[in-house]
Amino acid sequence: MSVQAFELRDDDRRPPVDDLVGIVQRGLRSKPKRLPSWLFYDERGSQLFEAICEQPEYYLTRCEIALMDAHAGEMADVLGDDVRLVEYGSGNAVKTRMLLEHLHRPVSYVPVEISPEPLRTCVQELAEGFPALPVQAHLGDFTRPLRLPIPPRAARRTVLYFPGSTIGNFEAREAAELLRKMRAEMGDGGGILIGADLKKDVATIEAAYNDRAGVTAEFTLNMLVRLNREIGSDFDLAAFRHRAHYNAMAGRIETFLVSTRDQKVRVGKQQVSFGLDEAMQVEYSCKYSPEDFAALAAKAGLEIAHAWTDAQQMFAVYFLVRAGTTKA
């Protein structure tokens, strides 16, 4: 495998300490208090997320892998020959490998990942299965403009691959903004292959974010561990608990860290007060019907050219193109 431009330039998601302190302070001044979900993904957080995906309640990964197993060949046919595949949030690239096995003469693979160790692991593991595949790894924040590397040869189209249900972690306005950014980065004739969790019964959804083993709770609380380590705050982990519930009106899981007592937390030079049972919002996980997702794509000037679902109709993968370019 040819690995090009593999410089772990951590330039986006790990701001300088002073900037991170400011980000946290501003979030804690909000009403209600909130922290950005990207704070989950330090090295330990990335490991815990992989463990979440293995929990029996967490249907999302299991259903998406079944979907890819059944339809990856069809997806590759739709994408066509000589594709440059750019993946947002590559992680362990399990689903990516399933797609790459079917792609026709891929030009290159560009994994974009926030955490250096998962990115290294992704590259190393792909080297074993795809020794001829050029890889141009990029460490950084996919929500910010990307300087994509020059491919080793001309690509017929650039396809941005966004597996999982990460698009659901963005509020509607932010999700549309991200899709507009992706639309620009894919260029003329490009496309977006993107996963989205489908709406379903509330009990199934809520169980996925409140696993019995407590892995998701540990993942959520690890955000505070990271802040204590990186900015010197003094969050007491024993004084916060994980809470996730489904807001049917908004169509999303809402995840909070809830204070278990009246307390004060030092963040930089500030003391932040928390009341008993005060909830600090840390993540959304939006669920979409196909109609919901088509409407979201339209706000970004995109349309659904192809759609695939697993046999249980739990999860969907869509291929998006510029609006007005699909055949009638």
Image (cartoon, rainbow, N blue to C red):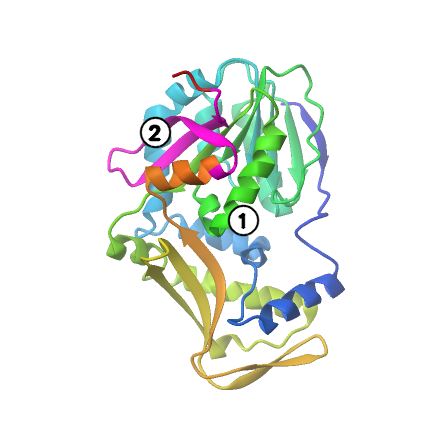
Q: Amino acid at mark 2?
A: Trp
Q: Are marks 1 and 2 in contact (CB under 8 Å)?
A: no
**For residue 182, what is the image quadrant?**
top right
Q: Residue at x 51, y 45 (%)?
A: 175
Q: Amino acid at mark 1?
A: Glu
Label 1 belongs to which residue?
A: 174
**For residue 110, what is the image quadrant?**
top right
Residue 319: say if magenta: yes
* Along the line of sight, the residue nearer the viewer: 113 or 168: 168
Residue at the extreme bottom of the image, as rendered: 262
- Quarter of the picture containing the C terminus is top left
* Along the line of sight, the residue nearer the viewer: 33 or 240: 33
Question: x, y (%) of residue 304?
Answer: 41, 29
Residue 321's label in the rendered image is none
Res. 163 visible in picture? no
Q: Is residue 221 above or below residue 268?
A: above
Start and end of the magenta stretch? 299-325
Of discs 1 and 2, which sits in the foreground? 1
* Along the line of sight, the residue nearer the viewer: 190 or 112: 190
Q: Residues within 10 Å of mark 2 (few under 14, many from 20)?
A: some
Q: Is residue 289 above or below residue 68?
A: below
Q: Residue at x 69, y 67 (%)?
A: 21
Question: x, y (%) of residue 312?
Answer: 24, 37
Label 2 belongs to which residue?
A: 308
**For residue 71, what is the image quadrant?**
top left
